Amino acid sequence: TPEVISTSGYYELPPIGESPKAYKITHGFAPDEFLLIENRAATSFDSKIPKEGLLIWHIDNEGKHKPDSAVGPNGDHYRVTLIQADGNHDLELGVNRGDEGDVFGAGATIGIGFTGEGDTVYPNTDSYRGGAVTPTGIEISVISDPDENGYVSFSVTFPDDPLPELTPPTSTPTSAPKLELVRKELMTTFAGGTGSYGVMFDVVAMNGLTITSADLHVS
């Protein structure tokens, strides 16, 4: 079951071929309409994909399995649509079965497409239930390259919910912790002739021990 993202923040995904994890965004969409985000890496069943990165799907369970007309600003669309990063709609138009332009790689951004003026920008995060294109205001950005374990990080920003600032790591070295010197006296007493030639004892140091002086009193 995909994990729902409901607040602005920074997220990461492992390769879905190694860990079945995905994110789902429902905020701003109609019921049963949402975005689904996966990390696809060249491993397992994805070993021959043309490019690694995020795949972002637009799911509308009231959409058609095959649109009657070309996709575009009129909102005609498939029930399950891969939002192609290059905005070319090659899959819908039958140009190919997928290429590297479909993947959201490092530095890519997707946000509002329809502003009410001019042409709709593709790709976008707009809702299009029933042909009514409605901006959700959601932006997906700060997409990283896969790290050494194949994880990809990214940010999601919702309207009226600013993205939290990242605190950069400090380059200023921190000072070493101060050690508190604790002085203790260890004393033993011979009385009444007990013992033969001295007192024997063990000293066990748990966190280090320094003996600075020893006084022996022999009668």
Image (tube, helix red, strand yellow):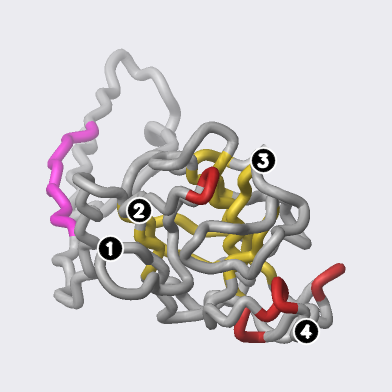
**Is residue 58 placed above or below 193 in the rendered structure?**
below
**Is residue 36 placed above or below 73 in the rendered structure?**
above
| Percent coordinates x, y for residue 151 in the rendering | 58, 67
Say which residue appears at 38% left-offset and 35% top-offset. Answer: 198
Q: How much space separates mark 3 and mark 4, taking CA atoms?
A: 24 Å
Say which residue appears at 71% left-offset and 49% top-offset. Answer: 64
| Percent coordinates x, y for residue 202 in the rendering | 44, 37
Element under disc 4: loop
**Is residue 171 placed above or below 17 in the rendered structure?**
below
Q: Earlier in the sequence, mark 1 or mark 2?
A: 1
- Residue identified by numbered label 1: 115
Side (left or right) of 145 relative to 45: left
Q: Nearer the viewer, residue 84 or 53?
A: 84
Say which residue appears at 34% left-offset and 42% top-offset. Answer: 7
- Residue identified by numbered label 2: 135
- The reply to whether discs 3 and 2 touch (Cβ–Cβ < 8 Å) is no
- The reply to whether discs 1 and 2 touch (Cβ–Cβ < 8 Å) is yes
- Residue identified by numbered label 4: 96
Q: Nearer the viewer, residue 26 or 194?
A: 26
Magenta segment, which residues?
Answer: 177-186
**What is the number of the mark on residue 61?**
3
Q: Nearer the viewer, residue 21 or 28?
A: 28
Q: How much space separates mark 4 and mark 1, taking CA atoms?
A: 30 Å
**Is residue 97 placed above or below 16 in the rendered structure?**
below
Element under disc 2: loop
Q: Nearer the viewer, residue 128 or 80?
A: 128
Q: How much space separates mark 3 and mark 1, taking CA atoms?
A: 25 Å
- The reply to whether discs 4 and 1 touch (Cβ–Cβ < 8 Å) is no
Q: Earlier in the sequence, mark 4 or mark 1?
A: 4
